[in-house]
Amino acid sequence: MATMRKSIQLFDHERALLVKLYVQWRIPIDSFDAMPKEKAAFVQEWHRLSSRTDSAGELIHYMKVQRKRGRWVKLEGDFRRPPPSPEFTAEETEVLVSIYNDRVTVQENGSDTLSFDDEIQGLIAKEFHAETGRYIEPHLLVMKLTALRKRGLLPKVGNRGKDKEDRGFDDIGEATA
C-alpha cells in the first residue's frame, strides 16, 4: 500500500520565506538529493529564519507537492548544478532499477518517496552493495534513480505488468442481479 505523507502546512508569510530562500539558494528541488550538505544547510537556515522545526524530508515533500500543483517558483535556468553522479555499468543500473521496483513500486510508492525516506534510501544502498559489491552513498543512488525517472526509464507505480483483464476484485461490493 502506498505511503501517504501529509504535507506540512505553512502560513502565507512562511511560504513566502521558503520561496525566497529557495530562490536565493538556487538549488532545484530534485538536486537537493545529490547535495546533502547543501540540503542540511538549507534546512538549518530555514529553521533559523522561520523558527520552525520541519525536517528536510518535510520541506522537500512540501516543495514537490507545490510544484506538482503548479504552485512553485521556477528557477528558469539560473540554478546550481549538482555534482556529476558516479558512473554505473548497464548491469549495475539494472540491479538498481530492480531493487527500486521491488522496494518502492511494490509498496505503490513513487520515486518521490526516495527524497524524504531515509530508511528506504538506506535499504536500497544496502541491497545494491550486497548485489554488486560496490558501495555507493544512498543520496547518489537516489540521484541516479531520479535521472532514470526523468528519462522515463523507471517502472511506474501501479504498472507492474498487470494487463487490463487482471483487475483483481473490482466487482466487490457491486449488487448482483
Image: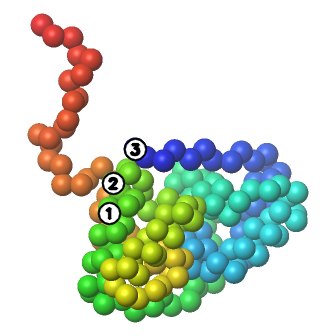
Q: Amino acid at mark 3?
A: Met
> Label 2 near label 1: C-beta < 8 Å?
yes
Residue 93 pos. (x, y %): 32, 81
Pointer 2 residue: 106
Q: Which mark is residue 177?
A: none
- Image quarter of the C terminus: top left
Pointer 1 residue: 101
Residue 173 pos. (x, y %): 27, 17
Local secondary structure at mark 2: helix
- Image quarter of the N terminus: top left
User: Horizontally, is 110 left or right of 97 in the view?
Assistant: right
Residue 21 visible to an observer of this rendering? no
C-alpha span from label 2 to label 3:
8 Å
Residue 139 pos. (x, y %): 54, 77
Q: Residue at x 71, y 45 (%)?
A: 9
Query: Which of the pair 131/22 is nearer the observer?
Result: 131
Q: Amino acid at mark 1?
A: Asn
Pointer 3 residue: 1
Which callout, 1 or 3, points at the residue further toward the start of the chain? 3
Categorize mark 3 by other alpha carbons within 10 Å: few (<14), some (14-19), many (20+).
few
> Label 3 near label 1: C-beta < 8 Å?
no
